[in-house]
Structure formats: C-alpha cells, structure tokens
Amino acid sequence: MIGEKSTLMIKAVIFDIGGVLACDVWENLFLDKDEGIVAKYGLDYNKVLQVGQKLWDIYSHRSTNDHQGWRELEREYWGQVLKHLNIKAHIDDLIELSDQFIKPAVGMGNILERLYLNNTELAILSNNTEFWFERQMDKLGYRKYIHRKKSSYQVAWVILSQARRWLCFML
C-alpha cells in the first residue's frame, strides 16, 4: 500500500450556517458598537447581551411546521426584543436592520459552487433561529446549492450513517 495513490471521494458535506457559511447574525446585530442595536438605540451593552442570549436560547430551538411560519416566529421574536429592551421602534425596523447583518462568510459561495458541480450532497445542521436561517438562505443565494430545509439532528444521523459507503465532512 505504501506509495499507492488513493483518492478519497467526498460525497457529502454538512455545514453549520452561522460562522461557517455566513457571518453570525445575532451577536453582530445586537452588539456592534457602530451599527448594531446597542449603537442605534443607545442601549447598555451588557443589558443587550443578556437579552440577546436569553432570546437566542429560546428561539434557536423553536421551529415551525410550514414554510411561512418562520415569519410569524420572527415577528414574535422582535416583539420580545422591543419589550425586553424597551425600544421605541416597529418590528419591521428591526427586521430591516437584521437584514444588513446577513453576510456570507468569505469564499463560501465559491466552495458551495464547486461542491455542487461535483454532485456532492450538501446539507445544513444548525441551531440557528429558523427565521435567520430562512433569510440567510434567500439573501445569500444558498438555496441553489442546498435544497433541504434546515436539517435536524435526525437528518444528519441519516447522512452520517451512510458514511460507511462514502466520506462525509461536517463543518
């Protein structure tokens, strides 16, 4: 075997979205000292951090059963942000602000394109909120490459269980 050339064929890649395919939304959106909620509304950094973490813990584990339900979940989330931070704004203002923080991770579009053209199975396993996930997929154009909805851990295990037949990376 020494000296023999071996080729590994990657058949599947499972990505996280926040920090891998896209820049993290909530930390930057809430805490950016120039353009985030802290700066825009003149709020205390630690209070915003506390509220952001509390709501992340709640909403990153909630999902909806239909394709449009994430919009209602998003409006509920922003209503809670307004209430907990006592911000005098409209929910749509915060949704618009959040959209400014949806940015691709450098180079990931090219990587997805190459994997897609090589017929690599692509999936996402993420604890991202359902609404930011949907917005990121749309705004960044990732639906072209990844047709599944945000994968559950059960879906990931199905993909990983097939790894006996081929190589799978999880990023």
Image: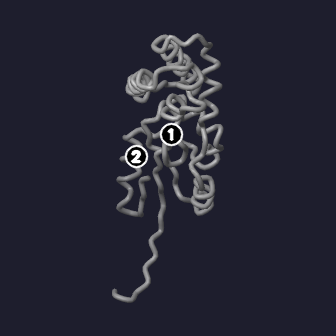
The amino acid type found where label 1 is placed reads Asp
Q: In the figure, 107 relative to 90: above or below?
A: below
x%, y% of residue 52?
Answer: 44, 25
- Using the image as rendered, state which of residue 126 and residue 1 is in the foreground: 126
Residue 107 sits above or below residue 65 on the image: below
Q: Which residue is mark 1?
A: 24
Protein image colouring: one colour
Q: Is residue 62 visible?
A: no
Residue at screen point 41% across, 63% down: 167
Nearer-N-terminus badge (2/1): 1
Say above or below: 92 vs 103: above
> How many neighbours does mark 1 have within 10 angstroms: few (below 14), some (14-19), or many (20 or more)?
some
Q: In the rendered view of the protein, which quadrant contains the N terminus?
A: bottom left
Q: Quadrant of residue 88?
A: top right
**Image coordinates for residue 33, horizontal then vertical, percent:** 54, 32
Q: Is residue 140 something one can see in this rendering?
A: yes
Q: Position of residue 166 (x, y in %)?
A: 41, 63
Q: Residue at x 54, y 47 (%)?
A: 21
